[in-house]
Image: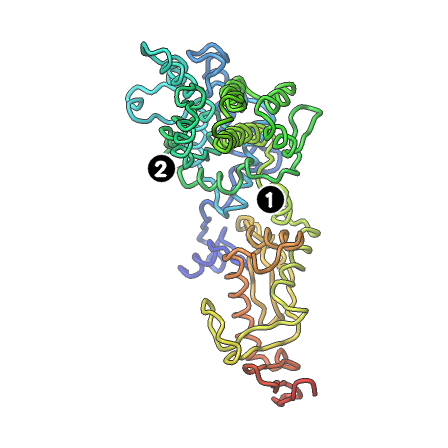
Amino acid sequence: MLKRIIQSVSLSAHGVSCWPLKDYPAIAVWPMDVETLVEGVSDRDAPAKQVIGVATSAAHWKDFGTCEAGELCPFCTSRNLLAGEPHAGSLARILRWYELASGKRWNFRDLFSLVSYLLAGTPTGADTAAYMPCKWAAKQLNPSGSDQRRIEVQRKRGVLRLVASQYQHALFGSWPIERAAALRKDITELRLGEFPALAALQQFLALDKRRESTVTLKSQLGGISAILDPAKASPSFEVSVSGNTSIQFEDLDRRFSLSIKAGRTFLQKYQCLTPIEIAALKILEEGDLKLSDHSVRRQRPATADRVQALLRMIACRIARRSIGVRAAVTNDADVLEEFHRVTEGDATALQQATRQVEGLLNVNRRFVVCLNNTFGEPLPPPERRAMLTTDIQRVKPIPASEDAGRPKAPVRFLRVGASDGAKPIALTFELFKATKSLRRGMVSASLPRSVVALLDTTRAGLAGSIVRDEDALEGAEIRLGVRDEVVVRTFERFVIREEGA
């Protein structure tokens, strides 16, 4: 019974009924964290959208712009955005993209932690005791002190901290903090250490190592930022900036590469930026204009170019994340959209991926594998290899289980080889992405290590079944080292044949 329970809740090519348990009708089990909470079922909203709806209910918030920080409060801004579309639906879609790309599921604990983090932030240091999000935001905008220059630097730094707390930038909280030391050296060299905009940016990168998230969210936020950050998305991706206007990311990249002002004014006319983002871009714009001044550039033009490039990159990153998250256009969004169709049973997308995996496993429509090494070992020298070559090993999709007594499988499986010795292989996102990249011209030598390991494991398993199958060996060839002789299996006998004979 224990063996059957383990089989029923495990992910495999051929699922076993768990509700009720196969062979034990009096027992029912259900695997945890397999079903998605960020995608709707039938005509019901996904649990993630329901959680966002409750958290952003106007009954629990002050009217926008009436809190202590006014229109520059990142938390009220995030609530105002997530209370409607397209922001709420796009956030749920991005969370679903992360599930597909990582193979992990959002559970209720992490989902509740994420929503509260995006809408209220987390206290740090001295703020922990009596942390109130809106009051914290107001404190960043109104620093205390008597030194006006220092107050100005702290206020500008506070605006940058606020934009980093807005939900799009809190979700993708990767900033070039490793450049902080070099930036300080450069602005000192340019004699701009007292310039408020540049000093504020340097402090933001050096002192604000991103506001700490909860322990349960740290790995998820790191994974989302590494996989889906719109700042890394292809320049050719189109993104909607208004109800009837779409632009490509390269349009932003080109304008921000010329000047921050050009990029800001281009986006402002579509009214797709929040007041906090506009304020942050204007601060970076001040530094950009200062670095364009001839009196600043003439002594250290290379240094000025380096600092200016950093400012424009950060400004473009803010703009990309803002509009990218709004429309759920992230890194690899096109691949994720197609992979989602595969998991949902789209026959065309699945067939294309199947053919590409077949091409990866075979060489020139022949299956070639080394017989005298094990998985994980490097290939022996050419003179010591025993290479088996057989007919092409076909790859076919395994039909998805329609058993109502178990949850829907999160990934599709493929069957490799003949029916008797066939080996199942999971069509993971990494493998699917590799097939897409190969169709676009990537060479096989550039495949990720995880994909190479998956293919090598499959080849090793196939080789073990082929050498024990008389029918599969018929017509196969074995080449030993670099000799001219080839061992051929024909008419149920092994025959030595001269190469070229």
| Residue at the spot of label 2 | 215
Quarter of image, res 254? top right
Q: In the picture provided, is 157 more to the left or to the right than 82? A: left
Residue 341 % position (x, y) = 64, 46
User: Residue at (54%, 32%) from the top-left corner?
Assistant: 91
Q: Which one is earlier in the sequence, the residue at label 1 or at label 2?
A: 2
Categorize mark 1 by other alpha carbons within 10 Å: few (<14), some (14-19), many (20+): many
Q: In the picture provided, is 304 more to the left or to the right than 340? A: left
Residue type, numbered disc 2: Val
Quarter of image, res 115? top left
Does the CB distance between marks 1 and 2 fall below 8 Å? no
Residue 56 % position (x, y) = 49, 22
Which of the pair 407/33 is nearer the observer? 33
Categorize mark 2 by other alpha carbons within 10 Å: few (<14), some (14-19), many (20+): few
Quarter of image, res 369? bottom right
Q: In the picture provided, is 32 more to the left or to the right than 90? A: left
Q: Is residue 89 visible?
A: yes
User: Residue at (49%, 53%) from the top-left corner?
Assistant: 18
Disc 1 to disc 2, C-alpha distance:
27 Å
Q: Is residue 283 above or below residue 446?
A: above
Q: Is residue 50 visible?
A: no
Residue type, numbered disc 1: Leu
Secondary structure under badge 1? helix
Question: Split into 4 quadrants, where in the image is the N terminus?
Answer: bottom left
The residue most toward the front is: 299
| Residue at the spot of label 1 | 336
Residue 415 % position (x, y) = 60, 63
User: Residue at (63%, 88%) from the top-left corner?
Assistant: 492
Q: In the picture provided, is 236 more to the left or to the right than 95? A: right
Residue 353 % position (x, y) = 65, 55
